[in-house]
Image: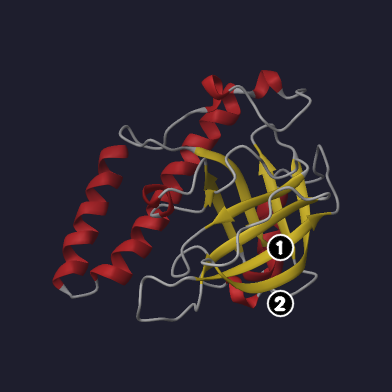
Amino acid sequence: MMKKIILALIVIGLTLSALGLLRIGYFEAKAELAQYLMQTAWEKSKNLLKDFSNQLDQKVDSGKANITPWPWADTWPVFKMAIPKISSLSLVLKDASGESLAFGPGLLTTKLYPGEKGNSFIAAHRDTHFERLGELIVGDIILIEHLTAKTLRFEVDQIEIVDSRTNQPIIDTNDTRLTLVTCYPFVATKSNTPYRYLVSGRLVIPTSKSVTKNPLSAETKLASRH
């Protein structure tokens, strides 16, 4: 199965290149296929940690959780994120390096996880996983599921556009906050822009267990009906 998926990536890349759609089509396809591979790694990590479900915090022993999605990967999923308003469900990688963001959202604040006091940041490209981020409004919900099955709920209360040349993200806040960030504007011919679109929410309802087997999927499917 792994070899077939990797071969599919190569075939897609060659085909779209021949059609002149390499930049848009190939990267979108790669992001989708990467999420599939990361889902497998995520499930393996959760299985390895099933005996540690009573841990106090969301963080786990990295030696047990670092399951890479493909053999040469230098990153791995650390939690799952759902945004019901835009029917988005994705796995978030351990960092936000250029290589990681090519495959999915990444954690910018690698020392601060969602659910810990302060402002944790997740970044993604504006033309893939965060292409609909601009549709969110104050009051919308962002869900985070950690490997230990703890699910956290954040409510959007701040949306702003900042210039990265003059504005630095504030991490040390008095509340528990999650901020999603991507390049701005969403539709642009230039790949390099100093502007960032920030959607920030505060923790409102932390729950250790959910009433459904997969609360993130359930809320995402519900949102898609509206």
Mark 2 crowd level (few <14, some 14–19, many ≥20, 10 Å Cα): few
Q: Amino acid at mark 1?
A: Ser
Name the residue rendered at 75%, 53% in the picture: 177
Q: Can I make out residue 1 in this image?
A: no
The residues bearing labels 1 and 2 have C-alpha atoms spaced at a distance of: 23 Å
Instruction: Give the residue drawn at x 30%, y 34%.
Output: 72
Q: Where residue 29 appears, x then y in whole percent?
A: 35, 61
Q: Is residue 32 left or right of residue 215?
A: left
Which-is-in-front pick, marks 1 and 2? 1
For disc 2, the marked residue is 226
Residue sitting at the far right: 205
Q: Amino acid at mark 2?
A: His
Secondary structure under tag 2 reads: loop
Q: Nearer the viewer, residue 46 or 22?
A: 22
Q: Position of residue 172 (x, y in %)?
A: 73, 47
In the image, farthest residue toward the left: 18
Q: Is residue 82 visible?
A: yes
The residue under the point 72% across, 43% down is: 213
> In the image, residue 133 lies at what x, y percent?
59, 70
Which element carries disc 1, helix, strand or loop? strand
Dot 1 corresponds to which residue?
200
Left or right relative to 47: residue 215: right
